[in-house]
Image (spheres, helix red, strand yellow):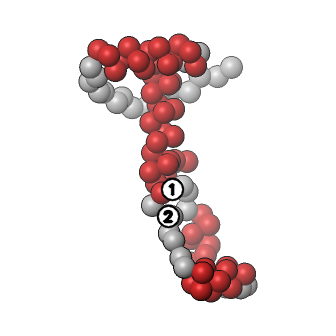
Amino acid sequence: MTTAVRQTTINLRAKAPQRSLIDQAARVAGKSRTDFMLEAACEKAQQVLLEQTLFALDAARFRRFQVLLDAPVAQGAALRKLLRHQAPWEA
């Protein structure tokens, strides 16, 4: 088993009840406080970022959107750049 070396420090202050709650949950999950907090923070960060890509359409606009999605993709530099772009949580 290899252990990843952490490269940066994140400091935060918490109230005693918050720390106790986090510690209790970490124990139940079988994780260290740090691992538990990092996992929870990363999950929340992904959720926040993914929510920024949600949009709503009425029925007519949704049908038009589906037509556009089903259309062949134009190959080009912009598409290659997009496909090479890494998601923020994968960086």
Q: Could you tell me the amino acid type at mark 1?
A: Leu
Query: Left of 81 or right of it: where is 13?
Result: left
Which residue is label 2 attached to? 53
Using the image as rendered, state which of residue 71 and residue 61 is in the foreground: 61
Q: Position of residue 80 (x, y in %)?
A: 62, 72
Which residue appears at 56% of the width and 27% of the height?
4
Please give the count of numbered marks on the rendered protein: 2
Residue underneath mark 1: 50
Badge 1 density bin: few <14, some 14–19, many ≥20, Cα 10 Å: few
Relative placement, left or right, of 19 versus 75 is left
Which secondary structure lies at badge 2? Answer: loop
- Identify the residue at image location x=49%, y=52%: 88
Residue 54: x and y, percent?
A: 51, 64
- The amino acid beneath tag 2 is Thr
Q: Quadrant of residue 8?
A: top left
Q: Is residue 48 visible?
A: yes
Mark drawn on residue 78: none
The reply to whether dot 1 and dot 2 touch (C-beta < 8 Å) is yes
Which residue: 50% across, 48% down? 46
Q: Where residue 78 appears, x then y in whole percent?
A: 56, 78
Within 10 Å of disc 2 (Cα), the crowding (few <14, some 14-19, many 20+) is: few
Is residue 21 depicted above or below 5 in this figure? above
Q: Residue at x 62, y 66 (%)?
A: 83
> Which quadrant of the rendered structure holds the N terminus?
top right
Query: What's the distance in space between the residues labelled 1 and 2, CA to CA?
Result: 6 Å
Residue 28 versus residue 51 in the image, above or below: above
On the image, the x and y values in percent for residue 82 come to: 57, 69
Report whether residue 75 is seen. Answer: no
**Secondary structure found at label 1:** helix
